[in-house]
Amino acid sequence: MKRSNSKQGERSNSASGLSFWEHLDELRSVIIRCVVAWAVCAAAMFCLRDGLFAFLFAPSQPDFILYRLLNRLAEATGYQALGVASFEPQFINTQLAAQFTTHLEVAAMAGLVLAFPYLLWQLYGFVAPALYPNEKRAAGRIICFGTVLFLAGLALNYLIIFPFAFRFLSTYQVQAQVVNQIALGSYVSTLLVLSLLMGLLFEMPMAAWALAKAGILHADTLRKYRKHAFVGLMIIAAVITPTGDAFTLLLVTLPLYLLYEVSIAVIRNTH
C-alpha cells in the first residue's frame, strides 16, 4: 500500500527543506557538538581523578559490595563455600608515562559513557526530520531500550563478572613462590574490554530486531534452537568468566539466556 499524500508531504517538507550542502553543514554541527560534549565530560572526569579511580579499583578491594554480600550469605546459610577469603592484590607500574596516559584513557572512556545519552540525542535529532511520526516513535524507543541494555551490561560486568574474574586470576598461582603483581595497564584494559564486551552482548535483542526487520531472522528459528543457544551462551559465559565455578557461570549465563528470550519476544512483536 502507498503512503498517504499528507505523510509524503510531511516527510518532503521536513527532509527536503535543506540542500545537500546544508545537510552536510548540519551534520558538521552535530559532530562538533558531540565532540565538545565528550571533551567537556572527559575533562570533568579527568579532574575527578580520585573518585574515578576509586570507582575503577573498587572491584579489586576485599571489601567490595559483592564480596561483602557473599560473606553475609555464607554466614546466614552456613555454606562457607560461598564466602570470599580476604586477598591483597598488588599493583605496579613499569613505564614512566603509563599512569598519566592511563588517566587520560580512563577519563576519555568515562566521559564517553557520561556523554552517551547526549550523543544519541544529537544523532537522533539529525535523522529525525527524515522520519515519519511512527518511525520517530519507534526510533526513540529503540534508542532508549538499547541504551538501557548497554548500561545493564556494564553494570553486570562491574558488579559481578569482573570482580569474580579478577579475584580468581589475581590469586591464581602455578607455584607459591611466584607472586602476582598486576600491571596498571593490564587491570584497566581488562576491565574496559570486558565492560565493552558485556555491553555489546546485552544488545542481543536489538541485533535480533534488526535481523528480523531485514527478514533474516524469525522467532520460530530462535524457539527451535533454544537448547543450542543455552549451551552456546554457557560457553561464552565460561570464556568471559574463567573462574571455574558453577555459581559464577550461572550468574552470567542466566542473564544472557533471559536476553535470548527477550529477543524472541521482540521479534514476535515486530511482525
Image: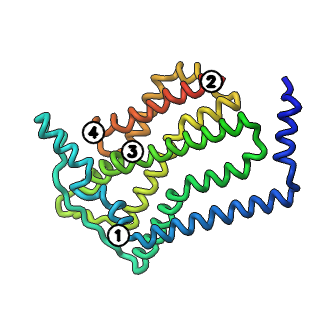
The residue to which callout 3 is attached is 156
- In what element is the residue under mark 2? loop
Of mark 2 and mark 1, the one earlier in the sequence is 1
Among the 4 quarters of the image, the one containing residue 131: top right
The residue to which callout 2 is attached is 218
- In what element is the residue under mark 1? helix
Nearer mark to the viewer, of 3 and 4: 3
Dot 1 surroundings within 10 Å: few (below 14), some, or many (20 or more)?
few
**Residue at image location 59% in from the left, 64% down from the top:** 37
Q: CA distance from mark 4 to mark 2?
A: 34 Å
Q: CA distance from mark 1 to mark 3?
A: 23 Å
- In what element is the residue under mark 3? helix
Among the 4 quarters of the image, the one containing residue 216: top right
**Residue at image location 27% in from the left, 39% down from the top:** 245
Q: CA distance from mark 2 to mark 1?
A: 49 Å
Residue 174 visible, this angle: no
Q: Amino acid at mark 4?
A: Asp
Among the 4 quarters of the image, the one containing residue 9: top right
